[in-house]
């Protein structure tokens, strides 16, 4: 008896019980779709967060002042230009590549009638690479600009749009920052929402000396942006920063620090742990639903064998070998689970086309391969027992059953 | 018609016993039965209900295994065959007709008749030809697309006969084939067996009906699990 005939018998058996076959398949469809969808969710979330972290600058470390806890008995010391200089010392901090002192001040920026509320960030040229800010057109300010305190300005995309119209390129135009004239020398590349911790599109960048000279005065720093030599050197750079600033600020208990070191690496570590727990949970849920689907197949195949015992008896009386009966029922359950698996993959894919909040689920090809493989496996594994039972029936016992 | 002693046995049964259950509740359905049938014979098996006729036929059809004794079919010791080989015997050597027709439901007459040929491994074209020829032989050529529930009892049994003989088996076994039929259909089906017998088929048929038994050339009586030969004349009187 040819395999083609076995498959035809199996298909006929399934079609004869259309509704039941469909409902059984539903279990597998849901199981497989869950596997695809949930792993895609985990994967999408992971990619989204990795993108966010990349936006922070992989080697970037930001130091911000912090209110120490009450037990410290002091308000703590602000970050100073001297702190920044100390961090730039290659002896004390060999893993630090660059140090950018930063002052920030909110300001309205005006050009003629147009006005935009922006955050002014005054720093040094190393800030651009340190904070991972990309220039769109024009130029960045230079070390010479910083030394001379030149009032040159680089606009974030949103600010440029507000002042000069969408997509404009207002190089060499003059704007007023809190009434102080600055000359636009560059425009940042659009960063898009959600990149990094703040939105660079709403910032304007100028030499720190110019900002201090005309807007904030020469006082404390808002933050210090440090770039590590490499991603690997980041942890070492962080501990160098901590020990230098601890010494300078007279701190011996890390709990009582008046500054905080924030890095993409720390974020990535925390998120990585959270995500792997999340993915494990999703995988467990998916696995459970697959097993439930598989048990559904066993159940239905047992019912099918019981219900068709008489038919099995007739087939045996007509000379069906055990292999033909085994094959028929095994192929039935494999078809159920394979078709269910393929439909489940389709449903899972369709599900991933729905964007969820900020991120899109991203299907893992391995999950698709595994899901289809597992569904065929389920068909064989869960179908084998009922099929063997059918094949082993004595013809006369099967025929006597009503 | 008498059968030459030189004609070989299609089946040969020696000391056959069949016990259902164990201990006090054991039922001795067959007791030490010796029975043989030569090629071309038409044998009727008669006996009261519960005497063991079906049990005997099921063993002859390789549907059930005896408790003891030997059964040779076409010279082969059936007990020595494994499950797969027995299925080949059922397929090639035996055609079984049941009282309850036992057609596969929701499946056309043609597909029912084709079924044994599928298990025999015949190609699509040849099995269609042979199944149609078998349906023609039983006078149902025009009903090949009908499903069992669209056929009368007599027609269903004729489909079952077509299915039993489509592989050209050495032995045709029928367990009260007319038991569920009205008298008109009974006449049709018996005429069919007569024709098959005339064309040389070997037939063993169980019946309650004297008139049916009268058509056979040899009658055996099963009484309380034991088998005895009866002359056609005695059978008529029984
Ligand atoms: N599967 C079975 N289990 C137990 N007893 C059985 C079974 N089949 C038949 N019998 C018993 O065996 C005896 C012979 O049955 P059977 O061969 O069907 O008789 P018949 O066909 O002559 O009416 C009866 O007493 C019947 O009750
Ligand atoms: Mg009976």
Image (cartoon, coloured by chain):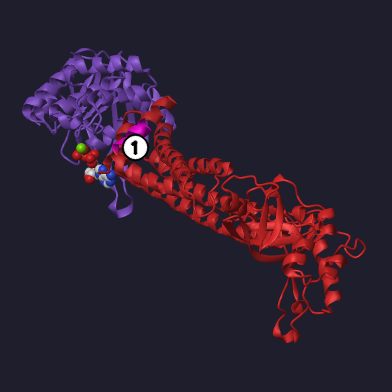
Chain colours: A red, B purple
Horizontal side, residue A45 vs residue A140: left or right: left
Residue B142 placement (x, y as % from top left): 17, 18
- Disc 1 crowd rating (10 Å Cα; few below 14, some 14-19, many 20+) is many
Which residue lies under the disc numbered 1? Answer: A14
Q: Which residues are magenta?
A: A9-16
Q: Quadrant of residue B188?
A: top left
Furthest toward the front, the residue is A112
Q: Would residue B73 be visible to someone looking at this image? A: no
Residue drawn at 68 percent across, 53 percent down: A174
Q: Nearer the viewer, residue B223 or A336?
A: A336
Our reading of the magenta stretch's main secondary structure is helix
Q: Nearer the viewer, residue B181 or B195?
A: B181
Q: Would residue A176 be visible to someone looking at this image? A: yes
Residue drawn at 66 percent across, 59 percent down: A176
Q: Quadrant of residue A90?
A: bottom right
Horizontal side, residue A396 vs residue A225: left or right: left
Q: Nearer the viewer, residue B166 or A57?
A: A57
Q: Which part of the image, by quadrant, shows the C terminus of chain A?
A: top left
Seen in the picture, residue B46 relative to A351 is either above or below; the reply is: above
């Amino acid at each position: 008896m040819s395999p083609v005939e076995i498959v035809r018998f199996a298909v006929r058996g399934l079609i004869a019980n259309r509704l039941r076959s469909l409902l059984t398949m539903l279990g597998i469809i849901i199981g497989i779709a869950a596997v695809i969808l949930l792993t895609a969710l985990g994967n999408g979330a992971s990619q989204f967060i990795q993108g966010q972290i990349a936006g922070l600058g992989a080697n970037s470390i930001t130091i911000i002042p912090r209110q120490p806890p009450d037990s410290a008995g002091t308000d703590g010391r602000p970050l100073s230009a001297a702190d920044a200089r100390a961090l730039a010392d290659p002896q004390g901090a060999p893993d630090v590549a660059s140090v950018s002192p930063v002052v920030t001040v909110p300001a309205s920026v005006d050009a003629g009638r147009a006005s935009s509320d922006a955050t002014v960030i005054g720093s040094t040229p190393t800030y651009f690479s340190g904070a991972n800010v990309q220039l769109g057109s024009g130029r960045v300010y230079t070390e010479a600009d910083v030394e001379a305190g030149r009032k040159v300005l680089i606009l974030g995309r949103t600010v440029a749009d507000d002042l000069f119209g969408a997509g404009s390129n207002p190089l060499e135009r003059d704007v007023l920052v809190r009434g102080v004239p600055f000359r636009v020398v560059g425009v940042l590349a659009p960063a898009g929402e959600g990149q990094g911790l703040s939105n660079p599109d709403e910032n304007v960048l100028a030499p720190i000396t110019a900002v201090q000279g005309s807007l904030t005065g020469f006082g404390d720093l808002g933050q210090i942006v440090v770039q590590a030599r490499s991603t690997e050197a980041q942890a070492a750079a962080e501990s160098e920063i901590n020990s230098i600033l601890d010494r300078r600020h007279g701190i011996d208990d890390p709990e009582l620090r008046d500054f905080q070191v924030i890095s993409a690496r720390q974020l990535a570590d925390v998120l990585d742990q959270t995500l792997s727990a999340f993915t494990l949970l999703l995988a467990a849920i998916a696995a459970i639903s697959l097993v439930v689907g598989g048990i559904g197949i066993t159940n239905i195949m047992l019912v099918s064998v019981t219900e068709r015992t008489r038919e099995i008896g007739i087939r045996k009386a007509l000379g069906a070998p055990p292999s033909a009966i085994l094959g028929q029922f095994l192929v039935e359950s494999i078809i159920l689970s394979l078709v269910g698996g393929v439909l489940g993959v389709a449903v899972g894919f369709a599900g991933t086309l729905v964007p969820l909040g900020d991120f899109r689920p991203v299907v893992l090809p391995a999950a698709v391969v595994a899901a289809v493989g597992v569904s065929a496996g389920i068909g064989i594994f869960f179908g084998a027992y009922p099929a063997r039972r059918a094949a082993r029936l004595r013809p006369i016992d099967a025929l006597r059953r009503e | 018609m008498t059968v030459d002693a030189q004609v070989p046995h299609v089946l040969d049964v020696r000391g056959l016993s069949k016990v259902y259950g164990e201990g006090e509740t054991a039922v001795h359905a067959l007791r030490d039965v010796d029975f043989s049938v030569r090629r071309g014979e038409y044998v009727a098996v008669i006996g009261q209900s519960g005497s063991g006729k079906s049990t005997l036929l099921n063993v002859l059809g390789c549907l059930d295994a005896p408790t003891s004794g030997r059964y040779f079919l076409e010279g082969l010791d059936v007990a020595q065959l494994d499950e797969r080989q027995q299925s080949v015997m059922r397929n090639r050597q035996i055609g079984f007709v049941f009282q309850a027709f036992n057609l596969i439901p929701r499946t056309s007459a043609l597909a029912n008749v084709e079924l044994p040929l599928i298990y025999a491994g015949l190609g699509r074209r040849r099995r269609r030809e042979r199944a149609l020829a078998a349906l023609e032989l039983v006078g149902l050529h025009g009903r090949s697309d009908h499903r069992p529930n669209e056929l009368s009892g007599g027609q269903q049994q004729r489909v079952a006969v077509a299915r039993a003989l489509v592989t050209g088996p050495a032995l045709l076994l029928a367990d009260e084939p007319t038991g569920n039929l009205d008298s008109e259909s009974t006449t049709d089906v018996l005429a069919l067996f007569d024709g098959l017998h005339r064309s040389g088929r070997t037939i063993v048929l169980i019946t309650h009906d004297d008139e049916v038994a009268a058509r056979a050339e040899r009658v055996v009586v099963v009484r309380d699990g034991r088998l005895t030969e009866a002359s056609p004349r005695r059978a008529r009187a029984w």
